[in-house]
Image (cartoon, rainbow, N blue to C red):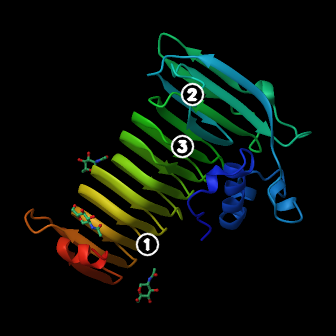
């Protein structure tokens, strides 16, 4: 699978996120992309001879003055990336910067996107249904902004380094990437796109991925975690929770290091749990069921895990 190593997002502002999405999308869902846009036989990505993503340039920008504790609502048919404002340039954390990029000479409907701030509601809205799926929108928001993002078609969502009360992401076939997000409540829902959690995700988390969506998690920490997939793999490297419930209809569930009460259920697939890192003083339990597959468990005490790590 084409999951990037750490550090990829630090690349050039254009190629970083956009290039990654292009690569993931070309590898994962060319059929879905064609299905979603039947009028165009090939996306610009597939057309480019070297398989390099077409280079996008900023076409339109907005700067709005906002309340640092407001929220962003986005409804878009294209990719959107959300990052915190640079604290050096904006020490008061009171701006939202929006950039729409696209391939130069393309046919984006730049007037078909609404970007506005409602002061009474403290809500920043970025809404379009006509902008065109080739567009990408980059938004820089105050660190504490709540996020409510929904894309249609193949629109991907990426959220980096947010620290908020509520973060909601909903896609159809688009990929959702969350990286180093700290949110009291994180909710991700997709109908076919991958869900990728990079770095540490902190907060009560709820991920629902249907159809062939896979869910891949580096490290997730929260008191309550619920994750379900339908036909796709659910894979988590570290899961530190008080209680979590993981389920899949037909996909495999593979867990690395886990901590806390856990219910795992895969109707048709296999379940593999490498280290269960349970301290003996607190009674934790794991309930794993795979009626049509196999369950592999390996238990490890806290002391053993310290030895394994070479202390
Ligand atoms: C997870 O599911 C349980 C049981 O339905 C529910 O009580 C809990 O609030 C859910 N947690 C999240 C983070 O959605
Ligand atoms: C589950 O494991 C069995 C035996 O290890 C394997 O044959 C099968 O392909 C696995 N199922 C999936 C969905 O990977
Ligand atoms: C196991 O849990 C302990 C205590 O919560 C933690 O300090 C340690 O890093 C964990 N070990 C692994 C391998 O995750």
Distance from mark 1 CB to nearest ligand 2 atom below 8 Å: yes
**Image position of 217 (left or right of 265):** right
Quarter occupied by residue 110: top right
Above or below 266: residue 9? above
Above or below 190: residue 117? above
On-image quarter of the C terminus: bottom left
Above or below 230: residue 133? above
Residue at the disc numbered 1: 250
Q: Which of 79 and 76 lies nearest the eye of the viewer?
A: 79
Residue at (49% x, 56% y) in the render = 198
Name the mark on residue 159: 3
Rounded to the nearest whole Å, what is the CA distance between mark 3 and mark 1? 28 Å
Secondary element type, mark 1: loop
Q: CB atoms at circles 3 and 1 under 8 Å apart?
A: no
What is the x, y in percent for residue 208?
43, 53
What is the x, y in percent for residue 136?
71, 41
Residue at (75% x, 40% y) in the render = 135
What is the x, y in percent for residue 260?
21, 61
Residue at (60% x, 41% y) in the render = 151
């Amino acid at each position: 699978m084409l999951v990037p190593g750490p550090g990829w997002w630090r690349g050039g502002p254009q190629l970083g996120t956009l290039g990654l999405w292009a690569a993931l999308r070309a590898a994962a869902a060319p059929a879905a992309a064609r299905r979603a846009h039947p009028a165009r036989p090939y996306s610009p990505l597939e057309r480019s001879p070297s398989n390099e993503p077409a280079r996008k340039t900023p076409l339109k920008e907005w700067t709005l003055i906002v309340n640092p504790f407001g929220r962003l609502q986005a409804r878009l048919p294209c990719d959107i990336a959300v990052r915190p404002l640079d604290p050096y340039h904006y020490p008061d954390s009171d701006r939202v910067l929006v950039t729409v990029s696209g391939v130069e000479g393309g046919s984006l409907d730049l007037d078909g996107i609404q970007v506005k701030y409602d002061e009474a509601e403290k809500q920043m809205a970025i809404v379009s249904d006509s902008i065109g799926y080739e567009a990408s929108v980059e938004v820089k928001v105050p660190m504490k902004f709540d996020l409510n993002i929904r894309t249609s078609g193949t629109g991907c969502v990426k959220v980096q380094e947010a620290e908020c009360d509520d973060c909601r992401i909903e896609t159809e076939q688009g990929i959702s990437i969350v990286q180093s997000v700290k949110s009291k409540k994180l909710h991700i829902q997709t109908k076919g796109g991958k869900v990728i959690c990079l770095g540490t995700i902190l907060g009560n988390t709820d991920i629902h991925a249907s159809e062939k969506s896979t869910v891949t998690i580096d490290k997730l920490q929260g008191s309550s975690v619920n994750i379900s997939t339908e036909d796709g793999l659910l894979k988590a490297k570290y899961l530190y929770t008080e209680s979590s419930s993981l389920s899949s209809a037909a996909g495999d569930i593979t867990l690395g290091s886990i901590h806390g009460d856990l219910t795992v259920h895969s109707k048709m697939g296999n379940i593999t749990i490498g280290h269960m890192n349970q301290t003996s003083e607190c009674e934790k339990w794991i309930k794993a069921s795979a009626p049509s597959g196999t369950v592999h468990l390996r238990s490890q005490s806290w002391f053993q895990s310290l030895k394994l790590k070479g202390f």
